[in-house]
Amino acid sequence: MAHFIDNDWNLNNRIINLIKVSNHKGATIGEEIESSILQLGIKKIFTIIVNNASSNQIAIDYLRRRAKVRNCIVLDNEFMYRRCCTHILNLIVNEGLKEVNELVVKVRNAVKYMKSSPARPDKFKLCADKQNILGGGLLCLDVPTRWNSTYLMLTMALKYGATFDLMQDEYGQFVLHLLEIGGREPKSDNWKTIDAFVSFLKIFYDVTLQISRSTNANSNFFIKEVAKLYRHLNKFSQSVDKKLAIMSERMLLKYNNYWGDFEKVNKILFIATMLDPRSKLEVLEFWFIDFLGPGEHPSLLHY
């Protein structure tokens, strides 16, 4: 996917190529990307967004070297490598999910059972109708490697928490089946924990939607949104709810591994933030003073 601004200052997004890569070695990936951009006549690249796999770092290093050979350097290629923000968010939240993995598995098993035959959703809907739970669709099953789908699954399951209990009363085989596949139906007490967890995760879901938009520019939101996440995690790391506190501490460690180091953040994002008249320097003051701490900080002036 290529993003560019045309002569009329309109943001464009285009899928320029789909490639079957023979292996996942960084050099191979770099060669394939270079081959594609040369075929398309693209001479200069400002930024490439990839996930955090080590092979991608090698691929970017390869492209930097090749750009120098072809004299196609943009700002000394310093901003060519940008880690995918949504992938980092996925890693951070999955670290927190480990703390409530047992509950998540219980909900997943329950939803999977409800959706595994044509008759069960009808029974489930009848139980929901008896409790006057209306609108918004029924249950959805998550993709375990996509945390935002897990969030949506938990949100919908939470809405129908009482319906699961009624299903147990009217259809006893519900529990027996879940015992066979290695889980138990979510108990009433567990819904309170899930409710707290869903409320805690909502900010991550909102931030994911904000920074993954593709129809308009969003780099100017990045620093503000990740600063918001830091405040959120720091607050809940001191929560009286021990489970949420432990979860937040684990996620903070993962957060700091990627965004707590100034050198690992693409500096152009700070420039984009300053150019946004709604933010100006307020967000940067938080980043360099509240987050990184007092003292001398790297200057952005030479950028």
Image (cartoon, helix red, strand yellow):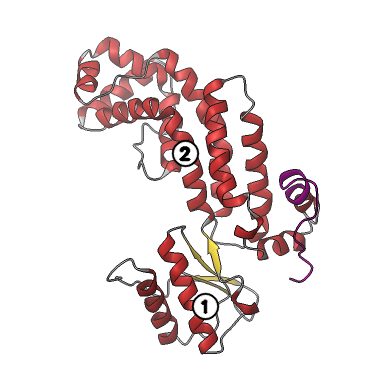
Res 41 label: none
Q: Is residue 218 visible?
A: no
Question: Which region is colored magenta?
Answer: 286-303
**Between 136 and 272, which is closer to the camera in this rendering?**
272
> Label 1 sits on what residue type?
Arg
Q: Earlier in the sequence, mark 1 or mark 2?
A: 1
- Judge by depth and name the residue closer to the eye, 194 or 157: 194
The question of residue 292 being in magenta is answered with: yes
Tell me which residue sits at (38%, 74%) in the image.
27
Secondary structure under tag 2 reads helix
Residue situated furthest bottom in the rendering: 70
Contact? badges 1 and 2 (CB < 8 Å): no
Classify 10 Å Cα crowding around label 2: few (below 14), some (14-19), many (20 and above). Answer: some
Residue that carries the numbered disc 1 in the rendered image: 64
Q: Secondary structure at mark 1?
A: helix
Res 163 seen here: yes
At x 80%, y 56%, the residue is 280
Horizontally, residue 166 falls left or right of residue 248, namely left
Of residues 20 and 218, the one drawn nearer to the viewer in this rendering: 20
Residue 9: image location, x then y, percent: 65, 75
Would you name the residue on which mark 2 appears? 95
Q: Quadrant of the C terminus?
A: bottom right
In the rendered structure, which amino acid carries the disc numbered 2? Glu
Left or right: 20 in relation to 15? left
Above or below, 218 against 176 in this view is below
Marks 1 and 2 sit apart, C-alpha to C-alpha, by 32 Å
